[in-house]
């Protein structure tokens, strides 16, 4: 079942987010601060900005923000900021994206933006996102300073 997260989901969401961030951000010198990440997860949950995949426990999640675009503040951007699942539920994770798009329509977003933290899976994701109607937007690069 896919549903909005509740406060009792915070630890499970934190654990999923930490695993994903640790895998993809540590290689760029970005360390996960547990207190900050937990606060972030809790803030998103309180604002009803987290969906979870519940299979007798949280096995996946997606969090987002809604903001104006820097070049046109009247355009509402629905930006996915955290999307992850455990490896056994990757297929469910794409169902989660479809429900997330429903949320974007509910808040009358003009554009939905998805991110990708790993270039290793980018060709596959570009094909999947393309089939879902998304267009390639940009790539970010990072280095420790």
Image (cartoon, rainbow, N blue to C red):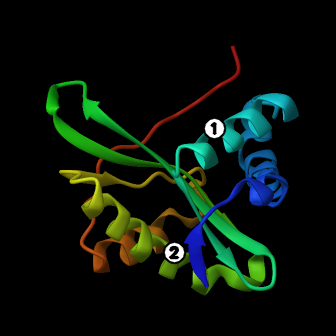
The answer, for residue 92, to whether it is visible in the render is: yes
Residue topped by disc 2: 96
Spatial separation of the CA atoms under disc 2 and disc 1: 20 Å
Quarter of the image with the N terminus in it: bottom right
* Residue position marked by numbered label 1 in the rendering: 43
- The local crowd at label 2, few if under 14, some if 14 to 19, many if 20 or more residues have their Cα within 10 Å, is many
Q: Nearer the viewer, residue 53 or 89?
A: 53
The image quarter in which residue 54 lies: bottom right
Q: Residue at x 74, y 33 (%)?
A: 39
**Image: 15 above or below 98:** above
Secondary structure of the residue carrying tag 2 is helix
Q: Name the element at disc 1.
A: helix
Q: Are marks 2 and 1 in contact (CB under 8 Å)?
A: no
- Image coordinates for residue 40, horizontal then vertical, percent: 68, 36
Q: Position of residue 12 (x, y in %)?
A: 82, 60
Q: Nearer the viewer, mark 2 or mark 1?
A: 1
- Tell me the residue at 59%/30% (across/down): 142
Residue 16 visible (yes or no)? no
- Relative to residue 4, is residue 89 drawn left or right? right
């Amino acid at each position: 079942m896919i549903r909005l997260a509740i406060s009792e989901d915070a630890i499970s969401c934190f654990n999923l987010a930490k695993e994903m961030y640790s895998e993809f951000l540590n290689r760029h010198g970005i360390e996960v601060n547990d207190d900050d990440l937990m606060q972030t997860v809790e803030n998103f949950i309180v604002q009803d900005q987290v969906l979870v995949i519940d299979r007798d426990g949280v096995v996946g999640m997606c969090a987002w923000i809604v903001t104006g675009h820097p070049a046109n503040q009247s355009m509402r951007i629905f930006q996915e900021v955290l999307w992850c699942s455990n490896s056994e539920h990757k297929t469910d994770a794409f169902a989660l994206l479809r429900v997330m798009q429903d949320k974007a329509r509910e808040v009358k977003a003009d554009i939905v933006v998805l991110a990708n933290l790993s270039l290793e899976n980018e060709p596959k994701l570009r094909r999947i996102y393309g089939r879902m109607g998304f267009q390639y937007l940009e790539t970010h690069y990072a280095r420790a300073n």
